[in-house]
Amino acid sequence: MPYAERMSRLRSRPAVPPRLRLALALVLALLAGGAVGRVSTVLLRPPLVLGQDAAYPGSAAVVRLEREPHPFIDIQPQDGRANTLLVLYPGGLVRPQAYEWLGRALAADGVQTVIPVFPLDLAVLGVNRAGELIDRFGPGKRVVLAGHSLGGAMAASYAARHPADLSGLILMAAYPAGNVSLRAAPYPVLSLLAERDGVASAADVRGGLSRLPPNTALTVLPGAVHAFFGRYGPQKGDGQPTVTREETERRIVAAVRAFLHALPERGAASTQPARQGR
């Protein structure tokens, strides 16, 4: 085939769309940069095993992994009677069982804790998961949404759009995104700050208070670091703790208990607006 004809046929083939070219270039760059291991670490999540590192002194609870309509860990008081529902969003790339200890610690206080299992362990891929859990378990209970780190930012995002769903919000080493404001939220907020956190800086957490209700309670955990909120081991970039994990966990439980006990019972007089659609 003459050279001119071959070139003409090549030019007549459909062009590769710009977005596809960009995606292919990114894949090649990742492969060339040795990122295969890092990508596989994100895509291949560790096994979800309950009860292996979740004991808390004096706790008694019934813990199950439920799979419908989406997977979640369900932690209930041993007698099955709960007056408070706590929906807890894990931190980014943290397996949900890392927070099982907290649900067990609160069960004796009549708290049912449910922890969603997000795709790739990223709450940003399922911000509205709280809705289905509140619909299922929330009726007749005080409903509190909580989140750690990225999970806290996503919890704040949900809370801003569904104020009537909630009786309270707990942010653990977290703060609302810059475009999210809860200044007029009708529910109380607890913000927990680890003093030596190297991931969510004190400046960022304190700065986030400007987007939270004026009466937000800020509790500083002395000597604690970012990874002390969940039992998932050390975290890259985190600070160096000057207290034990056990001492910090006791302080977290005490702060959360005090916050929950101060909430009005479900059905008490409220100024919350009508429930919004999802």
Image (cartoon, rainbow, N blue to C red):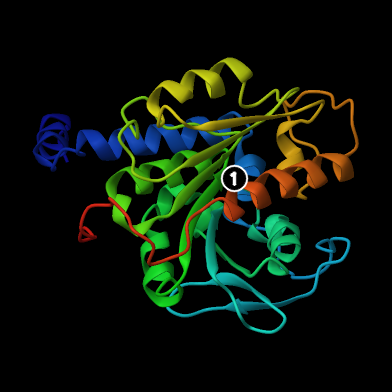
Percent position (x, y) of residue 121? 56, 53
Quadrant of the drawing holding the C terminus? bottom left
Against 138, is 25 above or below?
A: above
Given the current orientation, which residue lies at the most extreme front position?
269
Quadrant of the drawing holding the N terminus? top left
Is residue 94 or residue 257 the one in the foreground?
A: 257
**Amino acid type indicated by mark 1:** Gly
Percent position (x, y) of residue 177? 40, 30
Against 148, is 196 above or below?
A: above
Q: Is 151 left, or right, of 8 in this rendering?
A: right
Against 143, is 149 above or below?
A: above
Residue 90 showing in the rendered view = no
Residue 98 showing in the rendered view = yes
Identify the residue shown where x is 84% and y is 24%. Answer: 240
Q: Is 128 left, or right, of 71 in this rendering?
A: left
Can you identify the residue that label 1 sits on? 91
Q: Give the secondary structure at mark 1.
A: loop
Identify the residue shown where x is 73% and y is 23%. Answer: 195
Judge the density around disc 1: few (<14), some (14-19), many (≥20) Cα neighbours within 10 Å.
many
Is residue 181 or residue 94 the one in the foreground?
A: 181
Percent position (x, y) of residue 129? 41, 61
Identify the residue shown where x is 54% and y is 47%. Answer: 147
Q: Is 255 left, or right, of 115 in this rendering?
A: right
Given the current orientation, which residue lies at the most extreme bottom position?
79
Percent position (x, y) of residue 183? 34, 30
